[in-house]
Image (spheres, helix red, strand yellow):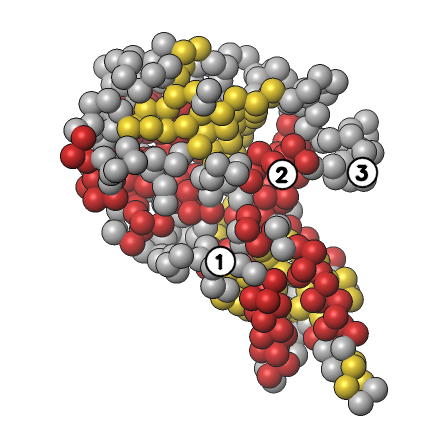
Amino acid sequence: MKRIKFWGLIISSFILSGIVFSSCSEQAFENHDTIPIVQKALYDTTSVYYSNFGKFPYQNDTLPIGIIEFDTINPMALTLLQLERFNNITGKEGDDHIPDFAGEKFQLLQDLENYPYNDYLDADREDYLREIVVKNALFLLSDKYYIHSSDKVAKGVKSPCKIIIVSSPIASAYGLSDIRQMLRIAKLDVKVLGVIEPTVRGVYNEIKNSKSDSLTIGILDTGEGVLFERAISDIKKKAKDVKSFSTLSGTIKEPLTDSLIRESIVSMIDSIESLPTQMPLKCLVLSSWEQALFSSTIISVIEELKSHTVNGRKIYAHLIDKDFKLIIPFECTAKECYNYLRNDNLLAFNPNDNQIEVFKSVPNYTVDTEYLDSEGFLTSEFKLSREVGKEEETTVIVKEK
């Protein structure tokens, strides 16, 4: 995957544990004007994208959790379904052997037709990327879906979502503030979470609670790590009470293997050792879902390095913090989702099984076949040529059968 570019990201603020930090990640465009798709959703009653937010149902615990996914594996949804970090009675951290989101309803939107999002950045089309992210949020907030891609109007009926999670780091960076701006103007109290801000908060808490006066935050990068690195580095710019720390990114080629993971971690530790000030590795941020699948390998390598002995001396032990911790963005986001819903009395607390509805973006029947590839997907050239603010729906969202 190509390394992500930052074009004119505007640094703005978000509140983190009572301290204001600067972030050019999920608040990249906080001070920008309202983009066309947001204007249409809010004000243009003739637009296909108009949303009458005044008819949004009263927030209640029976509404589903909406997730914008970017993979058929559904990594964010799987994380939520498997999370067991809280006591469901007290709400405090501690495993009670009951899934934290037991009985919740989920709506998953697999936006495979518009992916990969990084292509829009490489083509200087972040304007259209922002529109895509807002359109996806509008779908999760709506009560309709297309039964068939050949339908002229959406006839399927679904529930609006009580919270939205944007699971792609790139989509979080470039579209989250547009969604929040739209909801703020509409005075609709629906939380929207990305994966970067919760990760930064997780890292900050580790830094704040560390017993070391100086430390290193490592980031494994398979393409999107730069988004996390930039956001984490911003902590130092605004938080006056944090300990001294540095960020260190280790690039890994795909496809990932145990040996590549091992090589990257060893290289990162060697880099720390070569620095004049050897700050121990406190956290390692896993910037992708695929990396999280290698968590046990990473922990194993860290433990091996801690105990590796040469001539009776543990040569790496001082380079790794005694309270070393993996930071997994999806888990950080899932924990924040739980806390938001619990604090707002929106957790289902339902003994029944989870209900999951899967939706996917597909080409609209109005798109000429010359713009489709051999498998029926939109061609890359067509996707990147689309203009912002147009009424035409080049993709529609249907329910997975």
User: What residue is shown with label 2?
Assistant: 79
Q: Nearer the viewer, mark 3 or mark 2?
A: 2
Q: Gap in Å between the C-alphas at discs 1 and 3?
A: 33 Å
Front tag of 1 and 2: 1
Q: Earlier in the sequence, mark 1 or mark 2?
A: 2
Q: Which residue is mark 1?
A: 255
- Label 3–label 2 contact, CB within 8 A: no
Residue at screen point 30% across, 36% down: 375
* 385 sits left or right of 184 in the view: left
* Residues at marks 1 and 2, CA–CA distance in whole angstroms: 22 Å
Identify the amino acid type marked 1.
Answer: Pro
In percent of width and height, residue 386 lies at 21, 37
Q: Is residue 343 left or right of residue 384?
A: right
At label 2, the amino acid type is: Thr
Q: Which residue is mark 3?
A: 95
Question: Could you tell me the amino acid type at mark 3?
Answer: Asp
Label 1 or label 3, whichever comes before in sequence order: 3
Badge count: 3
